[in-house]
Image: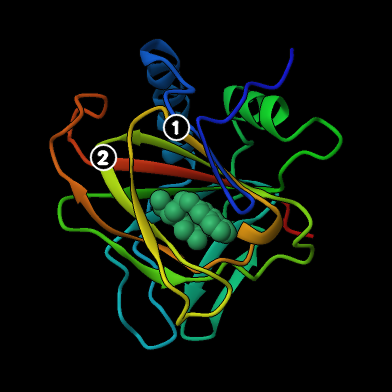
């Protein structure tokens, strides 16, 4: 399959608007129900003791975690069970847009309920920044903010919608980014409303 062209590009940051159609989005949500059954969502606490408003779980060899000891990848769910495998339909998106030479080690699953947000941060807990991070948005619209490699660099904001896929490689890989807010109730994909974001990462 030839790689589709991004609908927007910006310094290593590629957006594929509407990459997944409605049925493909619904199929991924079904796969994620099974992931969440085996690895329930939890509210991580930062090393400052504050619970994050985003709930999380993971699939793959590693899952992302934070507690009093700080941010890191761990090889089991905090309850001690293995992380479930990354669903095939999720891996297919990675293979189409990044390639099949190396598969991701982690699929972080973020759930945003009403009022949830994610502050501006860099993703730098991975060993090799030459691999991009791929993000899949499902459910309600979200205001995504992206800046530069320095926290003080100017930022720009984009609405991400259900079915949009973003690939962050090259200069964008270490860019500061975050989710300012979601527009709760703008999608009917998730029965309870809210937004799920999947990020696929090569960890080690
Ligand atoms: C730009 N998630 O899980 S996805 C995260 O929508 C995270 O849940 C947001 O930031 C979300 O760490 C944004 C888009 C994204 C993900 C990783 C990136 C953008 C990125 C890594 C580097 C640069
Ligand atoms: Fe991030």
Determine whether, in the image, residue 31 is placed left or right of residue 169.
Answer: left
| Callout 1 crowding tier (Cα within 10 Å): few <14, some 14–19, many ≥20 | many
Q: Position of residue 112 (x, y in %)?
A: 28, 50
Q: What is the residue that sits farthest to the right in this orientation?
A: 101
Q: Quadrant of the N terminus?
A: top right
Q: In the structure shown, which secondary structural element does the residue marked by tag 2 occupy? A: strand
| 2 or 1: tag closer to the N-terminus | 1
The foreground one among 27 and 78 is 27
Q: Position of residue 99 (x, y in %)?
A: 78, 31
Q: In the structure shown, which secondary structural element does the residue marked by tag 1 occupy? A: helix
Residue at mark 2 to residue at mark 1: CA–CA distance: 19 Å
Query: Which residue has dot 2 on it?
Result: 141
What residue sits 67% from the left and 51% below the top?
169
Q: Is mark 2 within 8 Å of ligand 1?
A: no
Q: What is the residue that sits farthest to the bottom in this orientation?
A: 48
| Callout 2 crowding tier (Cα within 10 Å): few <14, some 14–19, many ≥20 | many
Q: Decide if residue 57 is in sight here.
A: no
Depth check, mark 2 against mark 1: the one in front is 2
Please give the count of numbered marks on the rendered protein.
2
Q: Is mark 1 within 8 Å of ligand 1?
A: no
The foreground one among 130 and 195 is 130
Q: Position of residue 6 (x, y in %)?
A: 57, 30
Q: Position of residue 75 (x, y in %)?
A: 67, 59
Here the colouring is: rainbow
Q: Are marks 2 and 1 in contact (CB under 8 Å)?
A: no
Q: Quadrant of residue 101?
A: top right
Q: Quadrant of the C terminus?
A: bottom right
Q: Decide if residue 177 is in sight here.
A: yes
What residue sits 32% from the left and 59% below the top?
54
Q: Quadrant of residue 203?
A: bottom right
Query: Which residue has dot 1 on it?
Result: 32
């Amino acid at each position: 399959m030839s790689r589709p062209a991004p609908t927007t590009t910006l310094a290593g940051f590629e957006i594929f608007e509407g990459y997944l159609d409605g049925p493909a989005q619904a199929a991924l949500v079904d796969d994620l129900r099974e992931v969440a059954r085996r690895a329930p969502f939890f509210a991580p606490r930062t090393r400052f003791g504050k619970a994050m408003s985003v709930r999380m779980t993971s699939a793959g060899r590693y899952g992302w975690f934070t507690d009093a000891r700080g941010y890191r990848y761990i090889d089991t769910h905090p309850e001690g069970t293995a992380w479930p495998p990354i669903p095939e339909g999720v891996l297919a998106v990675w293979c189409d847009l990044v390639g099949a030479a190396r598969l991701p080690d982690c699929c972080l699953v973020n759930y945003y309920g009403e009022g949830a947000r994610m502050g501006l941060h860099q993703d730098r807990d991975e060993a090799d920044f030459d691999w991009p991070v791929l993000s899949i948005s499902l459910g309600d619209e979200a205001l995504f903010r992206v800046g530069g490699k320095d926290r003080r660099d100017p930022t720009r904001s984009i609405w991400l919608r259900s079915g949009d896929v973003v690939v962050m490689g090259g200069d964008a890989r270490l860019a500061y980014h975050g989710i300012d807010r979601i527009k709760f109730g703008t999608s009917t994909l998730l029965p309870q409303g809210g937004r799920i974001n999947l990020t696929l990462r090569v960890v080690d």
